[in-house]
Structures are given as structure tokens and as C-alpha cells.
Amino acid sequence: MANGPPTRNLLRIAFDNFLKSFRPRQMKGNFVGEDYFGNKYYEIPPDPSVGRRRASRWFEPTEKEAYDQEITAEWEAWLRGRRTEPPTDQELMKNLAIMKMKERNAAELDAKFSKAKDTAALEQPKTGMGSFPQYD
């Protein structure tokens, strides 16, 4: 029975993994980019030889104590691994221009329809139950 198949010593594997857990890890990542809010993005690339199959990605916000941080959709997709390449500055500026245009259009529409609501509210006096519509 001495020439049988090699066996794995589970206690030895567990002990080796325990000892490996005390090794220092790479805590400093490679700077990848910055968005227009001022957040900085970092990455530690994957290294299968040490057991890291996925890249570690994170960001440093401009204000450390602010819990309502805003990040762009492109950078969030990169952080979560839905895209492999970080967004380019041209892509970020193009999407920022589209976002500003939508905000302007929404403000114009809101101003236009709020005037229409105000004049309609002045023309129809409310009687009876108040907020319920009344039909002829």
C-alpha cells in the first residue's frame, strides 16, 4: 500500500493557508484615473500566481467623511467589473454634456408646464370635496 495514490493532508493545507494569511498584501494600487467630481480611482491587477483572480478596484472620494458620494455611471461600471477598460476623458465629457442638456431641457419644460398649471388652477375654483375631480 506504500505505492498508492498520493493523498492530500488537509490539516497541512489549512495550516499553510493560515501562515500565508500573515504575509503583507499589496495595499497601494495603480492610479487609473479621475472623474470630474474629483474622485480618484485605483486598481490592483489580477495575479493568478498568488491567488488573485480578479482585479481589486476602489476609489478615493474628494471628501472622506461625506457619505453621499456621487460617482459617474461609467466609473461605477468599471468598479463593479462590468467593463474592463476605464472610461476615457472624452467619453466622460460627452456624457456630461448630454446630462447638462437634459437638465436644461427638464428645467425649460418644468417652467413651461408650471405656468400652465398655475393659470389652470386660477380659472377653476374648487368646490365640494376639494381634490376630487368634478364632471358635468
Image (tube, rainbow, N blue to C red):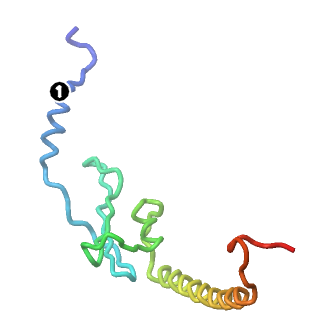
Left or right position of 120 against 78: right
Where's residue 39, x and y in %? 33, 76
Left or right position of 107 against 50: right
Where's residue 121, x and y in %? 70, 86
Residue at left offset 42%, top offset 60%: 80
Where's residue 126, x and y in %? 71, 80
Image quarter where the C terminus lies is bottom right
How many numbered discs, if any? Answer: 1
Left or right position of 75 against 13: right
**Image height of 26 relative to 4, above or below:** below
Tell me the amino acid under the disc marked 1.
Answer: Leu
- Which picture quadrant has residue 44? bottom left
Q: Residues within 10 Å of mark 1 (few under 14, many from 20)?
A: few
Helix, strand or loop status at disc 1 = helix
Residue at left offset 13%, top offset 49%: 23
Residue at left offset 28%, top offset 72%: 60
User: Of residues 87 and 126, which is closer to you in this image?
Assistant: 126
Q: Which residue is denoted by mark 1 in the rendering?
A: 11
- Which picture quadrant has residue 104? bottom right
- Which picture quadrant has residue 5? top left
**Image height of 32 relative to 10, above or below:** below
Image quarter where the N terminus lies is top left
